[in-house]
Image: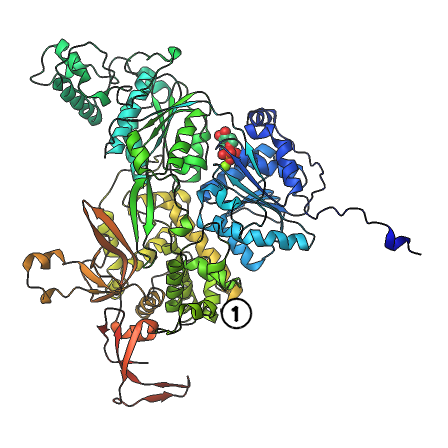
């Protein structure tokens, strides 16, 4: 009778313990051999045991140890993809695409099963088992499916990068994982990092009550000798060029990887290096007599002059070899040069001129087998650019075989720091800089600045040289600069960027107190407040009381302003909230196709470029004619006031007339558009249109008309109002020049505008098509600061003219109504059930007088 009650239950297996199965994968021998060389393969057993037994695991391992490509395969083989998907997030789109392709290739599976999804594109199908995506994509998915019920594992890759979305995902998943455990459909969370600095994840008890176990993948890293410079030159691009020149002409075999800060620098350096060490395929190269070089390029001459100058400087005498490629110094004797002996004697003059003497005390010590090869070299250099805006095909070239007889040289932004491992690298040239977009957390104004990277980044970059054999890293800065000016780590993005879209997204997920969210590193309270404020101005959150008298503790207890109906609509669109609002307002007068196009164009990075892209060339020459063309596009009378957005509409519309990719590429090249961006705009238009068809009920099924006709005059006017509604906090007014008596000051401020909430005037960007018209009132898309010598200057771009009487209607939150006018008498609009009256009002902090307006 009692047996059932007294018999002890067998110990329950915790829900998160995985019952291991084995799902075979059919790999080619070649792939299998390559895999076996990866350090993580040796740890498969340990890594998987840990994952099987714990709900949350942190995996740390050097870049290139095989985390991203192998871990998803381990999970697949262990059966995690049998019923649900394995999801892997990447902060960079480049990585999501490249890694999904690589893993599909290694596993011998089609892209319908190992797929990717990024904001503009993807190849996910119902058959997808392994899904690579950007972290932003997964965050959007959580909004509609909080428990992530389609997944059995989520891998957050590159967590050390501390991207905003990955940080939020860590916080959200710290709550989702226990919820899934309760429901007995466990979800595994794996946080992967290229550094061991994971204390923000492990030691944060708000995040995880018990710290998750950490497994370190021991990478087979060869020693990398780090060389500092004695001095830290400002022109690090020129210095990188010189250093590469020397490495290539003096040091043995091995690829060179150069880190600079941005696309322009990459292109500049690639052009220079290609000209100096041209690669001529096959016959052409062989036909050229070895000794007779083509005309010496400017750079070489420049380089030569510099060397000569240095030669003359010092008086000490000793003989040394000059190792410039393909230059016979005797042919280029400068007037006044003395004997050859004298020339050589002066070599000591500039220590930085020799590869190994410019370095710190621990100068480059060449191993015995690393004796300098013959001075000068005619060996061609296979120079490839790498940055995130480059097309995927061109990005992929870093993995393709190097033409015979060439040395590989990749010039990259920090994309190559941890997300992509380039094979064959032995030498790293590190500028020590990176380009960051710094935001003023409160105003949202941004500035692109070149700063020193962190010590952690510099060490990552150096590590790239030790993948194949012992390597060398040449740092183009001194050890003093490294020690004193490099921060240990870079600050997490979330503490540096405005968090408006995040705030709205989290609020829509029902997270009311964003301040109390378990962020790995919380953003500061002021920053969150500013985001809340901007969202209220937008109408996405209920308006906050302007002069709240409640005390700080009361405020703490108060619920934050609620999300409005408009806010919910806005958050559905995968674009910034201000663009979401523009879409939400456009469901009238057949405006939607235009707003969709405009929002897509505004959301895509750098649609218009000042450098045309030539076919078969990844590095393009600069061109200045595009500006004239853009002026003519925007200058059709009635459109003029729409300004820069009109240029975007035209550009997209016109580009879509090109029927083939080939025609599109040449159209883009001759009109200064980036064809990859046009492709992204097209995809985003389709995506936004689908979103509208799904979510907005009273829209007649909208379809994308690629070849959008220009808007009518009244539509153009409405578009200006819609732009204002989205960017009501970015209103500016021309500086009244006739009130300035000083002539110089008048000239200085010719293109200056006062922005509603900034002290300093901002200047119209040269690219603006409204620069000549200079309308009195405008909205701008972006304000940013540029460093000019010791001072800095504020610029605004993306300009549209507005009428001041619109402000009361579209940005009422920023208007101060002083008085309701008796005259003209208020009137009642029966259709809308509203009473309209005239008010006397001002706008913004500056208190600009508004014309008599009706509200
Ligand atoms: P981790 O994530 O630990 O940094 P990865 O898994 O990204 O390491 O890389 C493992 C190895 O796979 C590297 O040696 C890299 O060069 C190689 N690899 C990655 N993608 C490709 C590709 N498309 N072609 C050839 N090799 C690749
Ligand atoms: Mg990786």
Image side of residue 397 versus residue 292, left or right:
right
Residue 535 x %, y % = 40, 65
Residue 844 x %, y % = 27, 70
Q: Is residue 594 above or below residue 522?
A: below
Q: Which residue is mark 1?
A: 697
Q: Is residue 65 above or below residue 438?
A: above
The answer to whether residue 244 is seen in the rendering is: yes
Q: Residue at x 18, y 46 (%)?
A: 790
> Around disc 1, counting alpha carbons within 10 Å, would you say few (fewer than 14), some (14 to 19), or many (20 or more)?
few
Residue 19 x %, y % = 72, 41
Secondary structure of residue under mark 1: loop
Image side of residue 25 versus residue 665, left or right:
right
Residue 152 x %, y % = 64, 47
Most distant residue in the right direction: 1
Q: Quadrant of residue 47?
A: top right
Viewer-side residue, 662 vs 430: 430
- Quadrant containing the N terminus is bottom right
Q: Residue at x 25, y 40 (%)?
A: 622
- Quadrant containing the C terminus is bottom left
Image side of residue 149 versus residue 750, left or right:
right
Cβ of mark 1 under 8 Å from ligand 2: the answer is no
Viewer-side residue, 755 vs 284: 755
């Amino acid at each position: 009778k009692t047996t059932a009650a007294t018999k002890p239950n067998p110990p329950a297996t915790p829900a998160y313990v995985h019952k291991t199965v084995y799902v075979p994968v059919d790999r080619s021998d070649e792939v299998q051999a390559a895999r076996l060389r990866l350090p993580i393969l040796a740890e498969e057993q340990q890594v998987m045991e840990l994952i099987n037994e714990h709900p949350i695991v942190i995996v740390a391992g050097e870049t290139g140890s095989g985390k991203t490509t192998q871990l998803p395969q381990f999970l697949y083989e262990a059966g995690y993809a049998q019923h649900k998907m394995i999801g892997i997030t990447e902060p960079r789109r480049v990585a999501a695409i490249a890694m999904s392709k690589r893993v599909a290739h290694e596993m011998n599976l089609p892209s319908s099963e190992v797929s990717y999804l990024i904001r503009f594109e993807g190849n996910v199908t119902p058959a997808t088992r392994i899904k690579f995506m950007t972290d932003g994509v997964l965050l959007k998915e959580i909004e509609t499916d909080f428990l992530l019920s389609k997944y059995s594992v989520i891998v957050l890759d590159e967590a050390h990068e501390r991207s905003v979305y990955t940080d939020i995902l860590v916080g959200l998943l710290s709550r989702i994982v226990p919820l899934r455990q309760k429901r007995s459909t466990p979800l595994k969370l794996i946080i992967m990092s290229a550094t061991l600095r994971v204390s923000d994840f492990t030691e944060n008890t708000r995040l995880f009550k018990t710290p998750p176990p950490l497994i370190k993948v021991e990478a087979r890293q060869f020693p990398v000798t780090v060389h500092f410079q004695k001095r830290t030159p400002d022109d690090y691009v020129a210095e990188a060029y010189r250093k590469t020149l020397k490495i290539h002409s003096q040091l043995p075999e091995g690829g060179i990887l150069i880190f600079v800060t941005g696309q322009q620098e990459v292109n500049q350096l690639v052009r220079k290096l290609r000209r100096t060490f041209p690669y001529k395929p096959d016959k052409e190269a062989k036909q050229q007599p070895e000794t007779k070089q083509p005309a010496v390029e400017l750079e070489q001459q420049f380089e030569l002059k510099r060397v000569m100058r240095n030669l003359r400087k010092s008086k000490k005498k000793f003989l040394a070899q000059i190792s410039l490629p393909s230059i016979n110094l005797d042919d280029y004797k400068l007037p006044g040069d003395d004997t050859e002996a004298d020339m050589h004697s002066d070599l000591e003059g500039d220590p930085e001129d020799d590869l190994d003497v410019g370095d710190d005390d621990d100068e480059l010590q060449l191993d015995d087998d690393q004796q300098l090869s013959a001075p000068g070299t005619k060996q061609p250099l296979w120079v490839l650019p790498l940055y995130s805006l480059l097309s995927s095909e061109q990005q992929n070239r870093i993995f393709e075989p190097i033409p015979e007889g060439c040395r590989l040289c990749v010039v990259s932004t920090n994309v190559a720091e941890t997300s992509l491992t380039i094979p064959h690298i032995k030498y790293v040239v590190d500028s020590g800089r990176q380009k960051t977009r710094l935001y003023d957390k409160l105003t949202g104004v941004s500035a692109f600045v070149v700063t020193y990277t962190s010590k952690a980044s510099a060490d990552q970059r150096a590590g790239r040289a030790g993948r194949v054999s012992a390597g060398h890293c040449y740092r183009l800065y001194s050890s003093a600069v490294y020690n004193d000016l490099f921060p240990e780590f870079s600050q997490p993005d979330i503490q540096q960027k405005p968090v408006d879209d995040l705030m709205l997204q989290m609020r829509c997920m029902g997270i009311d107190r964003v301040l109390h969210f378990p962020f790995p590193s919380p953003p500061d309270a002021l920053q969150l407040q500013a985001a809340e404020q901007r969202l209220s101005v937008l109408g996405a959150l209920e308006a906050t009381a302007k002069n709240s008298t409640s005390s700080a503790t009361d405020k703490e207890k108060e619920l934050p302003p609620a999300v409005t109906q408009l806010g919910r609509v806005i958050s559905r669109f995968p674009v910034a909230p201000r663009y979401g609002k523009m879409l939400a307002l456009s469901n009238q007068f057949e405006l939607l196709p235009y707003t969709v196009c405009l929002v897509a164009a505004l959301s895509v990075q750098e649609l218009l470029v000042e450098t045309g892209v030539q076919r078969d060339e990844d590095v393009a020459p600069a061109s200045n004619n595009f500006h004239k063309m853009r002026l003519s596009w925007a200058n059709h009378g009635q459109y003029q006031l729409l300004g820069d957005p009109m240029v975007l509409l035209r550009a997209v519309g016109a580009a879509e007339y090109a029927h083939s990719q080939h025609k599109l590429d040449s159209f883009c090249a001759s009109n200064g558009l980036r064809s990859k961006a046009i492709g992204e705009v097209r995809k985003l238009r389709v995506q936004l249109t689908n979103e509208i068809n799904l979510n907005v009920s009273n829209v007649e099924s909208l379809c994308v008309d690629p070849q959008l006709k220009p808007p009518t005059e009244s539509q153009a006017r409405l578009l200006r109002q819609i732009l204002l509604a989205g960017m009501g906090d970015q209103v500016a007014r021309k500086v009244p020049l006739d009130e300035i008596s000083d002539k110089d000051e008048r000239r200085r401020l010719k293109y200056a505008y006062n922005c509603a909430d900034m002290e300093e005037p901002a200047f119209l960007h040269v690219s603006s098509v409204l620069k000549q018209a200079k309308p009195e009132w405008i909205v701008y898309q972006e304000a940013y600061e540029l460093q000019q010598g010791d001072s800095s200057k504020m610029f605004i771009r993306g300009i549209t003219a507005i009428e001041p009487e619109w402000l009361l209607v579209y940005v009422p939150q920023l208007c101060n109504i002083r008085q309701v006018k008796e005259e003209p008498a208020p009137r009642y609009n029966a259709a809308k059930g509203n009473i309209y009256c005239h008010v006397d009002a001002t706008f913004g902090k500056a208190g600009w007088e508004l014309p008599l307006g009706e509200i």
